[in-house]
Image: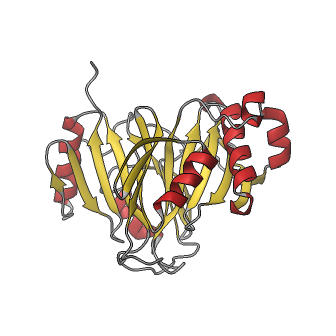
Amino acid sequence: MAEILPAKTDMGAVTLKVANLDRMIGFYQQGVGLDVLAQEGDSAVLGRPGVPALVLEVAPELKHAPMNAAGLFHTAILFDSKAELAASVYSVARKYPQSFTGSSDHFVSNAFYFDDPEGNGVELYWDKPRDEWEWRNGEVHMGTVFLDPNAFLRENITEQGLEGAVEGDAKVGHVHLKVGDIQTAKQFYVDTVGFEVTIAYGTQALFVSAGGYHHHLGMNTWQSAGAGTRTPALGLGEVSIEVPDAGELDALTSRLKSKGVQVRNDGREVTFDDPWANLVRVVAAPAAA
């Protein structure tokens, strides 16, 4: 039985529980530049055709969690080119100027950070070519160096971007979680689920991936050290992961059950809770036509 997730594992849409659907759609559609793929009643799906990135679900009965609770640190939307990233950053900065929280060159990527209207962290980023990533002793070399947002826009924005067009592919590249402690996170996401460590920062942060990506999941304790099980709250509703086929779903189910994790598997998807009651859904990629 495979003990690690397959190399072709990818992230799927992130579900957010929200208080104001129209306001949140406005930010992700008019600001970030995602398309509304579906909307019915109290929910909406945004992304690019065939590639959902966000599912927004109204939950009027819920309140915001305290800052030190476990949950979502940010959802990271990956763009295919610097021009597409620049167009999105320019759009958000112009229409939601108070939302910007920072920007960094991480050696493997260029990243810009925002908070959406309900305080959920958002990263918009572009990956540098993989052959430029540096690996040292099995860990990818990532850092945080200031990236001048104005210079980035001057160098990469196009006429279409200045006119507000955000085009091209965009998807969830990774998800960063707030957790209670890194050792428990490693035992669950690495030793049980089957991600591989790409970089570890002691008791503060852990980055893991499948297939040699710099990270599909990040976990940190910067605000949430010691956090226990989540109670229902606005914010993160679900993290989704896509594996290549149903056989990998079965392998994951066996691995989880062998470690005592409560798993629900209907043959098409597997759902389970992590140690902080973050819901994780794993689906098999659709078969090629």
Place residue 205 in its image quadrant. Answer: bottom right
Judge by depth and name the residue closer to the eye, 7 or 223: 223
Quadrant where the image shows the C terminus = top left
Report the side of 205 relative to 129 (left or right): left
Q: Is residue 129 above or below residue 237?
A: above
Q: Position of residue 274 (x, y in %)?
A: 32, 65
Question: Which residue occupies 30% across, 52% down?
Answer: 281
Residue 5 in sight in this render: no
Report the side of 251 relative to 99 (left or right): left
Q: Position of residue 193 (x, y in %)?
A: 31, 53
Q: Position of residue 195 (x, y in %)?
A: 39, 49
Quadrant where the image shows the N terminus = top left
Question: Which residue occupies 48% across, 38% down?
Answer: 212
Judge by depth and name the residue closer to the eye, 220 or 119: 119
Colouring rule applied to residues: secondary structure
Q: Position of residue 102 (x, y in %)?
A: 73, 58
Total residue callouts: 0
Judge by depth and name the residue closer to the eye, 81 or 252: 81
